[in-house]
Image (cartoon, grey):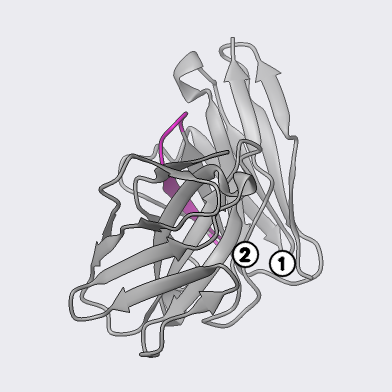
Amino acid sequence: GAVVSQHPSWVICKSGTSVKIECRSLDFQATTMFWYRQFPKQSLMLMATSNEGSKATYEQGVEKDKFLINHASLTLSTLTVTSAHPEDSSFYICSADPRGSGNTIYFGEGSWLTVV
Amino acid sequence: AQTVTQSQPEMSVQEAETVTLSCTYDTSESNYYLFWYKQPPSRQMILVIRQEAYKQQNATENRFSVNFQKAAKSFSLKISDSQLGDTAMYFCAFVPGGTSYGKLTFGQGTILTVHP
């Protein structure tokens, strides 16, 4: 079946550096992908909608200059956390679905980011 | 905007017994879908069950069934014959149909523990 893959699963970076997380749809094309953030024991909060070939749409309160999203192809979206700080440490997870309302929504495995 | 509320932060049940997790939502949309996701310690999001709002019949998937009350905007999950592997965090989620499909709004989550 359709699979969404995320990489890396775990990443540790130093405060002030940038880190990139990839989200790939392996056997379907996704014009839209979604990025969520989840703090421990909390719910998933939508950060942004990644749109292929155009700018991402960010949710209120999410800094677009800090969380750069690029969706350069129909199978790949990347989230770059720029100038990371310890408070950015979290679980980041992406989702995508084959074109068409009502289709199954698939999630990546998620990426743990720890900023030290 | 829509909201999803899960009022039970934690629930516990004995193995082989039945448990019901509650979820209410609020929306002005007429076309939408509702989901229950399971998130085990691995953090992988696993789809448990899906309900299309236009369908009056409650969805069932083996031991999992929902009680969908559209007028009351209620969407509870019943787990029958609970198993130790059901221990996880459960999220109720809403997604509008049409062009906004895929953009999930999650409830706060319910931690379910199944005791032997």
Residue annotated with mark 2: A52
Residue B24 in view, yes or no: yes
What residue appears at the point 41 percent right and 64 percent down from the top-left corner? B77
What residue appears at the point 35 percent right and 65 percent down from the top-left corner? B76
Magenta residue span: A39-54
**Element at badge 1?**
loop
Q: Quadrant of residue B98?
A: bottom left
What residue appears at the point 66 percent right and 28 percent down from the top-left corner? A19
Residue annotated with mark 1: A74
Question: For the residue marked with disc 2, what is the amino acid?
Answer: Glu
Of residues A54 and A29, which is closer to you in this image?
A29
Q: Chain of mark 1?
A: A
Q: Quadrant of residue B68?
A: bottom left
Residues at discs 2 and 1 both on one chain: yes
**Element at badge 2?**
loop
Question: For the residue marked with disc 1, what is the amino acid?
Answer: Leu
Q: Chain of mark 2?
A: A
- Where is A34 relative to B113, above or below? below
Quadrant in which the N terminus of chain A is drawn = bottom right
Quadrant in which the C terminus of chain A is drawn = top right
Residue B82, given in percent of the width and then of the height, sits at 54, 54
What whole-number distance in Å separates the C-alpha atoms at marks 2 and 1? Answer: 6 Å
Residue A96, given in percent of the width and then of the height, sits at 61, 63
